[in-house]
Image (cartoon, rainbow, N blue to C red):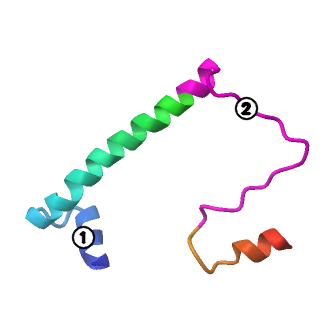
Amino acid sequence: MRRFLYSVMRGERRDLAALLVTIPLAVMSVLYGLAVRVVLECYKSGIFTRRKLDVPVISVGNLTMGGVGKTPMVIE
């Protein structure tokens, strides 16, 4: 499966199976991009507001999933 997806991403496959993967992903990508733009505009226009916290915040996430030591890092 991984080999198939990489070949689709590199443009090496242009068969029906590749189209069945790329078309829905392209649609979802456009929808996600629109959602991000809407949220950013809501912050710019003041609909969503930012909060200042009394303590420093460090975000440890979205680096990779599972088993890379995020939890021990946060505990430390």
* Location of residue 10 in the rendering, given as x and y in whole percent from the top left corner: 27, 64
Q: Is residue 51 left or right of residue 3?
A: right
Of residues 56 and 7, the one drawn nearer to the viewer in this rendering: 56
Q: Would you identify the image quadrant in which residue 40 lies? A: top right
Cβ–Cβ under 8 Å for marks 1 and 2: no
> Which amino acid is tagged 1?
Ser
* Location of residue 49 in the rendering, given as x and y in whole percent from the top left corner: 69, 28
* Location of residue 73 in the rendering, given as x and y in whole percent from the top left corner: 78, 72
- Quick check: can you spot residue 15? no
Label at residue 50: 2
Of helix, strand and loop, which one carries label 1? helix
Of helix, strand and loop, which one carries label 2? loop
**Residue under pointer 1:** 7
Of residues 63 and 39, the one drawn nearer to the viewer in this rendering: 39
Query: Is 35 inside the magenta-drawn segment?
Result: no
From this view, report whether residue 53 is shown above or below residue 5: above
Q: Which of the marked residues, 1 or 2, is nearer the chain's N terminus?
A: 1
